[in-house]
Image (cartoon, helix red, strand yellow):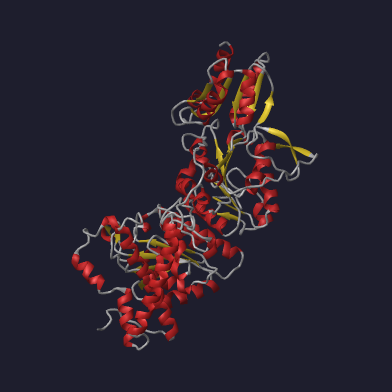
Amino acid sequence: MESNIEYKKHGLDSSTLITLYKSMLKPRMIEEKMLILLRQGKISKWFSGIGQEAISVGVTSVMKTEEYILPMHRNLGVFTTRNIPLERLFGQWQGKASGFTKGRDRSFHFGTQEYNIVGMISHLGPQLGVADGIALASKLRKEKKVTAVFTGEGGTSEGDFHEALNVASVWQLPVLFCIENNGYGLSTPTSEQYNCKDLADRALGYGMESHIIDGNNIIEVYTKVSELAESIRNNPRPVLLEFKTFRMRGHEEASGTKYVPQDLMDAWAKKDPINNYRTYLIEEGVLTETLDEAFKVEIKTEIDNALRIANAEEQLTSSESVELNDVYQSFEYQNIKENSETKKLRLVDAISEGLKQSMEQHQDLVIMGQDVAEYGGVFKITDGFVEQFGKDRVRNTPICESSIIETAMGLSIAGIKSVVELQFSDFVTSGFNPVVNYLAKSHYRWNQNADTVLRMPCGAGVAAGPFHSQTNEAWFTKTPGLKVVYPAFPKDAKGLLATAINDPNPVLFFEHKALYRSIRQEVPTDYFTIPFGQAAMLREGEEITVIAYGAAVHWALNTLDKHPSIKADVIDLRSLQPLDTETIYASVKKTGKAIILQEDSLFGGIASDISALIMEHCFESLDAPVKRVASLETPIPFINQLEDQYLSRDKFEGELLALMEY
């Protein structure tokens, strides 16, 4: 029998040829075993990579062990070629403690720093930008490393794919973008997925090199990727690879393959990467039937032994405290006391000074954002930073929030802190997926923190209209894994920003634009920190508790100045997640009345949760219903008279007086 694939040795010795064969045979035999276990109900789901082994094995075989690979759910060969113990893989698929996610995520949705693998999330696209971040770290450190990231042809339709390629090309990042073009995105054929002959052609639009590779030819994959990887290590740049292959089984086993024409299945079955390569090796005298059988016995024994170990492992148990404690990476707050020398700063200046001093504290901290370099950001917070820290650390980005947030995640995986400036907090919607699904969940899923701060200029009062005025903190305070900080004063902003950057968890740092140049305060000149989760008691009284944050703090204070007879506790929350409930409860139990003022619209906002918490924990101390005051349930209008009508600022006085009379 002759091989249906044309192989050329390219100078590879017999040992290498045999190693590649065994490396492909192993994931194939594991898959065949998993399909049996699936039918027996011993695993819940399986995404088959049968027919695509040459790509995973070929790419991984040329990567150095210290180089990161970001695989998909059909890349079992990546994990086995990196020699992850099979009992741990089986434990992962069974939701056992020996796996990589403590039963919290399934199949290949995991990463492991031990093996330099970063697994996918179901949204597919974000890992491409994460690869950019890992590659950026390599480039900043002048390491000769390449990062390989996988996607399918369906994933190339996502915006993240295009953003990631553009960023990698603009920054000349050492990334191998590997497209496994296997014919179908679930049941959607390529003819309904894109309208070009080859996906490799897309590289032209991004000014990057591309290659088309026979994804079923292990020798072609191995030799071509080896050549490119070595070239990229010495000449950092991104390269797009389109591997032509086919998916011989359903998207996952329950999907089936009825939507695939039988003649197409038959044609690709003849191009099976393992059967053809076996035939070739036997023809070349490199492999014998006896040796082949010995390999199969060896692998079967390894699989059976690993399954016995995994099956014998007890079912996973946990507790609420364990689950809650793993949402965030532990953080030992270091209190750096403020110095006695102060100077009067505006909020915008305090943030700039705090950011600059953090850049000095953390020698590899990277700032990324639109126009943050020479221009200094639209609010001039990073003005002069390029001159002090250089363009490697103060990086202008293309207009692509999603990919840059993903890049920050990649930097964190590689051990580098970052600050991302969202030009306006409204624009975070363009990067919402990586914030709430990647940054927020990674530590809980596989113990990988997201060490980044997203700076969020926000808020109304500046006649900027519906797309530059939102205060959208409530989108994130309900997402476990994120921390949310919202200072109202320059001193707090400087100290809390330092803490946010020190904290290894993802922090959204809200900065109210209307306060940038309107609020001044004496601020310590040196670097100092303020802890999260500690509200500030701005005034003390016995009659009522006023709770606010951001610009609403100043609205409350201005209103109380007009009514000096009202004796109120005024609490500036400062930190929304974590929230200082202890200070809130103590105050309400003392005063018996509570009013919560927020700039955001009412339904689903922070005030609603605080009100519920007070009702649950302080009910017996209350002398009146808890009152929430918030802005209109409309988008934020542009013209001043409409914006004034929208805001809760002018409603507060009447609601406060009414509650005092209750």
Residue 532 lies in quadrant? top right
In this view, the residue in front, 303 or 600, is: 303
Q: In the displayed image of the protein, which residue is found farthest to the bottom?
A: 285
Location of residue 662 in the rendering, given as x and y in whole percent from the top left corner: 56, 11
The residue located at (61%, 58%) in the rendering is 391
Relative horizontal placement of residue 560, taking residue 18 as reference (left or right)? right
Is residue 662 placed above or below 140 in the rendered structure? above
Is residue 645 placed above or below 315 in the rendered structure? above
The residue located at (60%, 42%) in the rendering is 379
Is residue 389 placed above or below 65 in the rendered structure? above
Q: In the displayed image of the protein, which residue is found farthest to the top?
A: 661
User: Does residue 32 appear in the picture of this structure?
Assistant: yes
In this view, the residue in front, 520 or 175, is: 175
Is residue 275 placed above or below 101 in the rendered structure? below
Location of residue 372 in the rendering, given as x and y in whole percent from the top left corner: 59, 50
Residue 556 lies in quadrant? top right
Residue 191 lies in quadrant? bottom left
Q: Quadrant of the N terminus?
A: bottom left
Location of residue 207 in the rendering, given as x and y in whole percent from the top left corner: 45, 65
User: Does residue 172 appear in the picture of this structure?
Assistant: no
The residue located at (43%, 79%) in the rendering is 19
Location of residue 259 in the rendering, given as x and y in whole percent from the top left corner: 22, 58
Q: In the displayed image of the protein, which residue is found farthest to the right?
A: 340
Count of numbered marks: 0
